[in-house]
Amino acid sequence: MSFSKKVNDKFNKTAKRDYISSLGTVYQQYLDRCETYWKEEQSQYGKNMGFEVAKFRNVNNNADIYEKKGGMVVLGFNPSGAYLGTNATHPKTSTPNFYEYDPFVNGPIAIDQYTKTVEQFATECDFADNHYILNAFGFVGKTQSALENKIINNSGLYEPIFQLPISAIIKLEPKIVVFANNGLRRLIIDNGLFSNTVTNYAWLPNNCVYDMELKDADDNTTKCYALFTTMLDKNHLDKGSRELIVQVIKNLP
C-alpha cells in the first residue's frame, strides 16, 4: 500500500469517526467573543460587511468536551465568504451579518476542499486527532488583496479582530501554528504588523520554523513553533514542498 493511500485511509476513518464531536469550551468562548465584538463594533467596518466564524474540530476519542493541548493550529486568511448561502453556513439570528460555518455539518464527504486539504495535511503530520482550523480575519464579502491593503494601511483597526483567534490559540497551547497563507507572512513578517501579538519570534535555521510567543490583550501568552507557508493545496504548493513541510513538522523536538 502506498504512503498516500495509507494517509487517505487514515483520514477517512478519522473523519467518519470524529466529524460529529462536541464543542469544546475554548471554541465556545471564541465564538462568544467574536459575536460580542461584531455586535458592538461592526459599524467600524462598513454596513455591507459580514463576519464568519468556522467551527474548529474537537477530536477527542472519548468525546471529552475540553480541547487538547500540544496540537496543531492551521491559521488561514480567506475573507471571501465563499460558503455563504450553502447548507453548511448558518446565520446567527441574534447578530446582523454574523455567520457560523460548520464544514462537518453534512459529514466528511461534504466538506469543502480547503478543509479536506487541512485534514489530510494534519493526518500526514501526525496531528489527525489534535488539530484546529481558524481564520485570522473572519470578514466576508471582501477579496483578500483588498483586505490585506486595508490592514497594512490601518493595522490598529484590525488588531482586535486578529486578537480573537489568537486568544483561542493561546488557550489551546498548540505545539505549532501553521500560517497557511502568504498574505499572513506579508503582514506579520514583511510588514512587521501585530508585533504586540506575535512577539519574540526568531528563525530557527536547523528546524526551518520560527520560535514564537503569542500574547493576547490581557497579557496571556503561549510559546510554540510557527511555520509560514502558502495555501496547502496542490494549486499553491507542489508535492515536494508539501512533503518537506510535513517532515519538518514531524521532526520538531
Image (cartoon, rainbow, N blue to C red):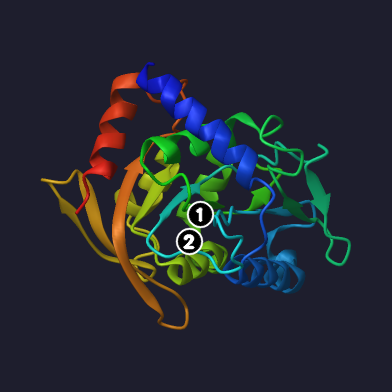
**Residue 245 seen in the current view:** yes
Mark 1 residue element:
helix
Q: Position of residue 48 (x, y in %)?
A: 79, 51
Q: Nearer the viewer, residue 7 or 164?
A: 7
**Amino acid type shown at disc 2:** Ser
**Residue 21 appears at what percent x and percent y?**
66, 54
Disc 1: which residue: 151
Q: Give the numbered dot on residue 155.
A: 2
Identified at 78% across, 42% down, the residue is 88
Quarter-wise, where is residue 25 in the image? bottom right
- State if disc 1 and disc 2 touch (CB < 8 Å): yes
Q: Is residue 143 visible?
A: no
Q: Is 38 placed left or right of 132 in the picture?
A: right
41 versus 228 height, above or below: below
Hey, which residue is sitting farthest left in the picture?
206
Q: CA distance from mark 2 to mark 1?
A: 5 Å
Which residue is situated farthest in the bottom direction here? Answer: 218
